[in-house]
Amino acid sequence: MKLRLAALLFAMLTLSAGAQPNQKPKNATEWFQRAAEQMNLRAFGATPFRMKVTFHAFPGIVLSSKPADQIISGDGTYEETWVAPHKWRREVIFGSYRAIEVESQAGRKLQASSDYEPSRVLMLLDALLYPIPRMFSSEVRMGQHLHWKIKDGEINGQPYVMIGTGDPAYLFLPNGELLQSIYFGIATNFTNPAGFHGKLVSQHIQIQGGNKQDLVTADLTVEPAGAADPAAFTLPGSPAEPGTTLRPLDFAEYNFSYPGQHFSPDETSGPSRPLGRLREVVDRRGMVHELEILYSPNPENFAPVLPLIRGDKFHHPPTIDKSPCEIAHGYIFGPQ
């Protein structure tokens, strides 16, 4: 995948809403930390807010006409009221899927119409909650050990900084504003920035696969929370298990036994071998959902492989703190 520099920077020639930096970061980790801090609306002591998001989810490349194999798509909404790190409410409406997650003094609770969270919802929440993967902004996680290439450039008079050149890769304005991320076959564009009490909010998010197909587009607004109704942060029942959450999980948070090779050499080698990246969602029972081709120069060559992966049933589903959880899982075919 290649960063779409010219189109993105042309769109970003308007003045940024972010504050100008006091000094230039010395390394990739500092760039990631600054961007994460700029975009973190949920930090301790941050201004309480209400966020409203309208989004559209697009079908993916699945090479199947079976209804059960399709990517769940259509229009949806996401609303969040955040008062403090342990007092918030999130609600998703997406087709027949409804979910509300709250945290308060009574603990964290989740109420959902299904125990499976659709793939496109996971993608959206990753962009909203973790625009910079946690492993990249941490000084003790593996992200700092990657051999990042940092490149300064300029297009039409607009300077930029690129960290990484393939996947993963990140594109910033000099003030630290994140324009685009490319991470495991998914390109996320952050545009139309607005300031909110010292933070930077991208009011439009576009999530694409490596073949430049749209996966999710979203428009969002953020306003002060004002007086929040205490009832909004209450749900019946007991606190949720650690793995029962809307929050996308970082791979370092959960335990999961990745499958062994289940393709014959004939299916993954030779002139018709599949190349690219796949994505699936593994639910709390270990079942595979919404398998799709994120990127491939020859997607048709995945035809014999996809049914085999769809048939996977992991006898040991992913867990976090010994609690079954849902994760997004990827496959890479060909050169890294």
Image: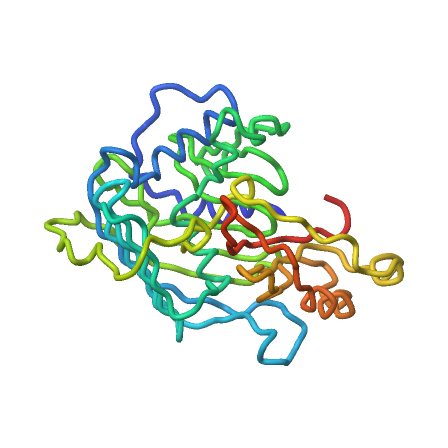
Question: Residue 156, position in %: x, y?
Answer: 47, 39
Given residues 220 and 153, the one toward you in this image is 220
- Image point 69% across, 58% down: which residue? 296
Task: Report the side of 201 relative to 187 (left or right).
Answer: left
Q: Looking at the picture, does residue 195 appear above or below residue 244?
A: above
Task: Report the side of 85 relative to 135 (left or right).
Answer: left
- Image point 33% across, 53% down: which residue? 239
Given residues 231 and 183, the one toward you in this image is 231
Quadrant (top left/top right/bottom left/bottom right) for the C terminus: top right
Looking at the image, what colour scheme do you see?
A: rainbow
Question: Residue 214, position in %: x, y?
Answer: 51, 62
Q: Quadrant of residue 57?
A: bottom left
Q: Looking at the picture, does residue 85 appear above or below residue 307?
A: above
Instruction: In the displayed orientation, state which residue is furthest to the front.
Output: 238
Question: Residue 19, position in %: x, y?
Answer: 29, 31
- Image point 22% across, 52% down: which residue? 50
Q: Looking at the picture, does residue 237 appear above or below residue 151?
A: below
Given residues 203 and 274, the one toward you in this image is 274
Instruction: In the displayed orientation, state which residue is furthest to the bottom.
Output: 66
